[in-house]
Image: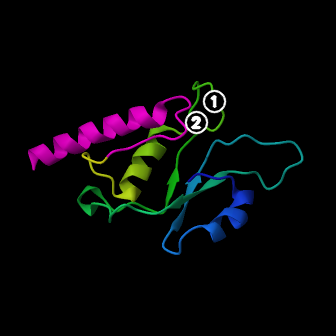
Amino acid sequence: MSLHSPSLKAILPLCPDDVRVMAWVKPMCSFKPNVAPAYAWEPVIVKPVRKPDVAFGTPRDWIAANMATGQGLRGSKPSKFCYWLFQVLGAEWEDEFTDLFPGSGIVSRSWEAYRSQFALLRAGA
């Protein structure tokens, strides 16, 4: 679940004990007049499906990625964020994924690309 940082203190107590709070750091963020410090990160609450496959690298509990541009929707996630999230979740190519907030469609497209890459890597093993 992606949130904005002020809502974290309200949402986190409603979550199971075994969730992790990750961070999406936005190097190029939008600055609001008279708001300091800037909101340059977004909390992401994660409950992994399984342990991530570290054969492809150990994921960090944060990702630095610029917001998606040209998607027409505020808060659109970039593909880099999506791939990181799939790895953190321990997602595998045969898993089913449902984007509850399809918006621009970038998350679903990223899932299909991730699944394809994962399947090709596994086939070569």
Whole-angstrom CA distance, mark 2 to mark 1, is 6 Å
Q: Is residue 95 left or right of residue 42?
A: left
Q: Which residues are magenta?
A: 96-125
x%, y% of residue 93?
A: 26, 45
Q: Is residue 62 left or right of residue 37?
A: left
Classify 10 Å Cα crowding around label 1: few (below 14), some (14-19), many (20 and above): few
Nearer to me, 73 or 36 = 73
Q: Residue at x 28, y 51 (%)?
A: 92
x%, y% of residue 51?
A: 32, 66
| Label 1: which secondary element | loop
Above or below: residue 29 compared with residue 57: above
Q: Main secondary structure of the magenta part?
A: helix
Q: Is residue 23 left or right of residue 51?
A: right
Above or below: residue 6 compared with residue 70: below
Q: Residue at x 55, y 38 (%)?
A: 101
Residue 57 marker: none
Q: Is residue 54 left or right of residue 71?
A: left
Q: Which residue is mark 1?
A: 73
User: Mark 2 touching mark 1, by CB under 8 A?
Assistant: yes
Q: Residue at x 58, y 29 (%)?
A: 69
Three-letter code, disc 1: Leu
Q: Which residue is mark 2?
A: 76
> Does residue 120 show up magenta in the picture?
yes
| Label 2: which secondary element | loop
Three-letter code, disc 2: Ser
